[in-house]
Image: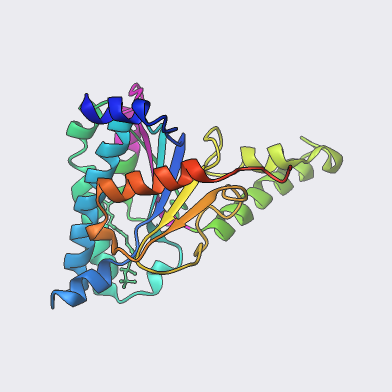
Amino acid sequence: MKSENSLIDRNINIPVHIAIIMDGNGRWAKKRALPRSAGHAAGSKNFKTIARYCNKIGVKYLTVYAFSTENWNRPKEEVDALMNLFRDYLKDTKKFIKENIALKFIGNKKGLAKDIIELMEQAEYDSRNATGLTVNLAINYGGRDEITEAVKEIAELVKNNKINIEDINEQTIENHLFTKNVPDPDLVIRPSGEYRSSNFLIWQSAYAEYWFSDILWPDFKPRHLMKAIEDFNKRNRRFGGV
Ligand code: FPP
């Protein structure tokens, strides 16, 4: 296919794991005098476009921040609208799976509606054999919450004499994160003109490259993703070395 060939021609390395903070839906809606929920609906549509594009160009993992542990503080109407968008998406994952995309979820299941948890588990099960892109949907996700849960699990192991304190290392912590077995993100993208990590993959992004842009998430097109990847290719990743 033309686009893939041109990637090879241009000697572009595709990051293994891309993470995206899908920010700016509210402002996108406001600019059009629409309710915030319309912005989230446009954001959800765009998530599908970008996930498909990632699959096409050979990204192995795409992690998207869909709902944070702090988003519960939004008006109930907005939270309900987001939950309904997740429901709609989760009821209609067949096409994605047919395209060889696997679905996984990161975040705290506590607090989510039972039917949403069941739909998530079904989607994970139905897509278990997909070998293309893995999409990690972060729903009710917070990096601090994730680390806190990991600490609790490890403390329990120490308490029950399953491991010694001296044996706890970085790998032990990673084994208790939602992302266990997922390589760290190479590139974290945040559109909409905000320059924060907002509690997203704070452990895993220790050495990620960040890419920011003013574009609001619903307007973020595959060509913007490609620009981020091209810029990523120009970065000199040293992982603390020289
Ligand atoms: C932040 O932008 C965005 C969110 C809190 C929600 C992100 C969710 C989606 C894009 C829908 C995902 C749906 C599926 C099915 C994965 P904001 O609303 O805070 O924007 P603002 O800063 O402009 O107000």
Q: Where is residue 7? Give x, y as percent.
A: 34, 30
Q: Is residue 170 left or right of residue 26?
A: right
The magenta stretch is 121-141
Relative to 135, is 206 above or below?
below
Q: Where is residue 41? Give x, y as percent.
A: 19, 59
Q: Where is residue 110? Give x, y as percent.
A: 45, 55
Relative to 133, is 214 above or below?
below
- Judged from this view, the residue extending furthest toward the front is 9
Q: Residue at x 26, y 66 (%)?
A: 25
Q: Is residue 15 magenta?
A: no
The quarter of the picture where residue 163 lies is top right
The answer to whether residue 57 of the structure is visible from this angle is yes
Q: How is the image coloured?
A: rainbow
Q: Is residue 124 magenta?
A: yes
**Front residue of this view, candidates 145 and 34:** 34
Q: Where is residue 227? Give x, y as percent.
A: 35, 48
Q: Is residue 119 left or right of residue 186?
A: left
Q: If the picture is divided into quarters, which one holds ligand 1? A: bottom left
Q: Residue at x 68, y 51 (%)?
A: 151
Q: Quadrant of the N terminus?
A: top left
Q: Residue at x 32, y 31 (%)?
A: 57
Relative to 18, is 36 above or below?
below
The answer to whether residue 101 of the structure is visible from this angle is no
- Judged from this view, the residue extending furthest toward the left is 33
